Amino acid sequence: MHCNSANGRPFTNTPVAMKCAAIGALILFSTSAAYAQQGQGVAPADTFPGEHMQCYRIPKSDPVKPEAIVVADQFGKSEIVLGRPVLLCNPSTKAHNGRSYGVPRERRNIHLVCYEIRRPQTVRRQVEFANQFAASRTTVDQRQIFCAPSAKKLLSGKEFPLD
């Protein structure tokens, strides 16, 4: 995972690098945008559909074949070139404040693989986000990673059941 510090150098191999993905890359699995578009502000944190994901750093990997892809999101349309995969995200269960959040059986095999973006472009936007942990207003400033739904096969260790 690469997120730039104030001096422009990436944070690497630190907890900061993993935590900055939530704001720097703005990976949101929620309905906040739909509420905001309807003039309702940010949706209540306990109404978000989608799975919780726990992401693991991929320390070494080969880059994908360099080719331009066009992506569009709520901040605009951009042509990007993907670098190497940097995160693998697993659907995850969670217990928080006496409430359990599961993963539907039909979605347990849908993972995310996130790729660094070569020559990331600046996109300054003021945003408000909310989830079970916090609500905040902040600025996002640069596309960092692009995540693709992916299949995963565990090759070592024991798989932990999600039931």
Image (cartoon, rainbow, N blue to C red):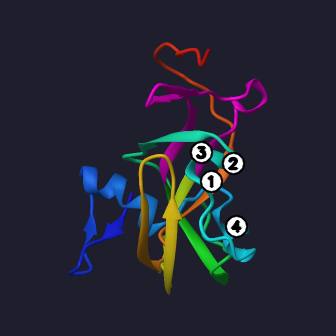
Q: Nearer the viewer, mark 1 or mark 4?
A: 4
Q: Is residue 74 above or below residue 51?
A: below
Q: Secondary structure at mark 3?
A: helix
Q: Which residue is mark 4?
A: 35
Specify few, some or many for label 3: CA neighbours under 10 Å numbering under 14, 14-19, or 20 or more.
Answer: few
Q: Residue at x 54, y 16 (%)?
A: 159
Q: Residue at x 25, y 73 (%)?
A: 5
Q: Residue at x 58, y 14 (%)?
A: 161
What's the amino acid at mark 2?
Answer: Pro
Specify few, some or many for label 4: CA neighbours under 10 Å numbering under 14, 14-19, or 20 or more.
Answer: some
Q: Which residue is mark 2?
A: 149
As for residue 106 lying within the magenta part, the answer is: yes
What's the amino acid at mark 1?
Answer: Phe
Specify few, some or many for label 2: CA neighbours under 10 Å numbering under 14, 14-19, or 20 or more.
Answer: few
Residue 30: which quarter of the image? bottom right
What's the amino acid at mark 4?
Answer: Tyr
Which residue reaches farthest left? 7
Q: Are marks 4 and 2 in contact (CB under 8 Å)?
A: no
**The label number, if any, that marks residue 64 in the structure image:** none
Which mark is first along the chain, 2 or 1?
1
Residue 148 point in image, percent of width and height: 66, 54
Q: Which residue is mark 1?
A: 29
Magenta span covers which residues? 86-113
Which mark is first along the chain, 2 or 4?
4
As for residue 55 lying within the magenta part, the answer is: no
Q: Nearer the viewer, mark 3 or mark 1?
A: 3
- Nearer-the-camera pick, 47 or 61: 47
Specify few, some or many for label 1: CA neighbours under 10 Å numbering under 14, 14-19, or 20 or more.
Answer: few
- How far is disc 1 from disc 4 in space, using C-alphas? 13 Å
What's the amino acid at mark 3?
Answer: Asp
Q: Nearer the viewer, mark 3 or mark 2?
A: 3
